[in-house]
Structure formats: C-alpha cells, structure tokens
Amino acid sequence: MKYWRFRAWQENPFRYAMNEEESHRCCNCNREYVGNFCPQCGQKATLGAVNWSSVRESVMEIWGVGTRSMTYTLWQLLWRPGYLIRDYISGKRQVSFPPVKMLLIVAIVCALITNLLGDSSEETHSAEGMDAVVAFFDWAERNQGWGFLIIYSTMILPTWVLFHHSPRCTAHKLPQGFFIQVFLSTLALIFVTLADFFVPILILIPIYYYIAYYQLFGCGLWGTLWRMVLCMVAAAFIVLMIVYVIVDMTEKQTGGHPAWLVKSIAVAVFGICCTAILAVGYAIGRWSQRRNNNK
C-alpha cells in the first residue's frame, strides 16, 4: 500500500548503496579505491571533469540547494518532522542542512515575502516610554529568526523534563533540545508568514508540534498529547516569570516596596506553578514507564 511505503520512507528515507566490485581512480590524488569516497583525500567518486552539471551544482549551492539541500531538508521537515529531528540529534547530520543556518535563511526569505506581498503599512512604535518587554517583541518582529529561536527556547527545559525517558529518545539531553526547537521554530516561522495571507494556517503550528513530538519520542497518542500540553503551559509560566523580572529591573521607581513585593510574589507563584507542573508530569511519565516495563 502507498500509505505503508510512505511510513517506511518517513522512518528511513536514506539509502546508502555501494558497489564493492567497482573500483575508481581519484581525480584529485590518483588513488585507486573501492567505495563512494576516496579514503586518502575524501573526494567523491562521482566527481570528474567540469561540465554543465558542475555549473548547475555550484550555482545551486549558493542558495543552499546543493549538498545537504536546504529545500530537501525543509521538505523532510514538512513530511517527517520528528524523524528528521531524531536523525539529526542522533548523529545523522550529513543529510541535513545546518538547522540554525536554515532558520536564519528562512527568516530572511520570509521577511522579503512579507515586505513584498504583505501589508507594508505597519504601525511604528516610538522609542519614548517603550518598556523592555515591548522593545523585545518589537526587536523580535524585525529579527524573526532570532526572535522565534529565543521564544521557542522556553520549551527546551519542559521538553527535557517531560520527555526525558521516552521510548525512542532514551538519552534526551538539553543540547539536543536546543536543536529540536530550532527545527520547530523554522516550521513555525514559515506558517506564521503564510498566515499573513491565510490566517487558518496558524492551526498547523500546534498540529505539527504534536506530530513532531509523537514521531520523535514515541510516547503514544495520548502520552504525547498531555506531555506537550504541559510543556506549553510550563513554557508560558517561564515567559511570564521572565517578563515580570524584566519589567521589575527596567521600569522606574513607581510605588516603592509594595510594588516590588507584589512582583516578587508573582514571580514566586509563577515559579512554583511551573515547577509543580513539571514535577507532576515527570512523576506520571516515570510511573507510566515502570508500568509498561512490568507488563
């Protein structure tokens, strides 16, 4: 069936075939060898004299459409987001375009599309009286790549806590969580840009988050859903804590100690709520894992 062939492609789209009987002579170092790459200098076996194909590949590489194609990586991110991310964080990096570089290039392209086709009559904010929070979101709007990465980075810690002992990523670490959010930020940025022309596309962001987490961690349909919801709630509390701290550090003295006390209590409440959510989710996840292991 086409569906099962598609599922098989999702899980493993790469095939590395090597003819062990065919020998090659390297055009670079003149070494004779068997395989896809020269063991002495590393040049690819299929490379030879310069031809029109070489011209095409050189031009395409300028836009990231050559080796480790950015367009192909985005295509995989669209159809197999979790599997692609798992391949990358598990060490299969040669087949993927560098994710941070991809995010920044996509941000530039999305900004150009918005400026050329979108409504250019944006409201400009005055720098006078602008607090730090509004200033940050204004900066994030102008620098969408870094802005999305910073905002989505609040998901790194909740994801690490709640999916730490997942079936498919048994050793999920915080650095891996960074690249998980880079890939997902790229998708979210594309959907937000398309939403300028068709608003309902925004619903694809949580859907793709769910699909990516389901494919990446393998916690089951329900297990992935409640963990992802708790991740988003915990991330929201982290954002609220950061906002309160920034406001408290940057705004002028307005009410003395009472205002400071109220903000300190609010930060403490947000921190307790975030910690409680993560602790409960972690405990339920460990209990589910033990129950499955005992079956």
Image (cartoon, helix red, strand yellow):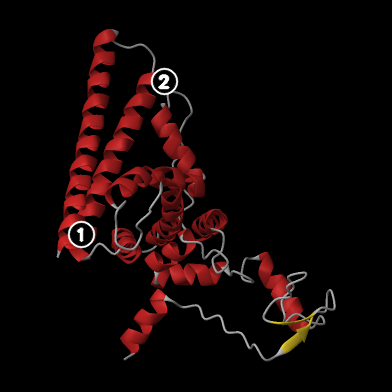
The quarter of the displayed image where residue 263 is located = top left
Instruction: Name the residue at 83% across, 74% down.
Output: 28
- Residue matched to label 1: 223
The secondary structure type at the circle numbered 1 is helix
What is the x, y in percent for residue 159? 32, 49
Amino acid on which the number 2 mark rests in the picture? Thr
Residue 122 at least partly seen: no
Q: Secondary structure at mark 2?
A: helix
Q: Nearer the viewer, residue 292 or 144?
A: 292
Mark 1 touches mark 2? (CB < 8 Å): no
Relative to 282, residue 89 above or below: below
Q: Position of residue 30 (x, y in %)?
A: 85, 78
For the residue pair 24 and 269, the one nearer the viewer reads as 24
Which residue is denoted by mark 2 in the rendering?
250
Residue at the far front in the pictured view: 294
Amino acid under label 1? Gly
Q: Quadrant of the N terminus?
A: bottom left
- Seen as rendered, the residue at the extreme top is 256
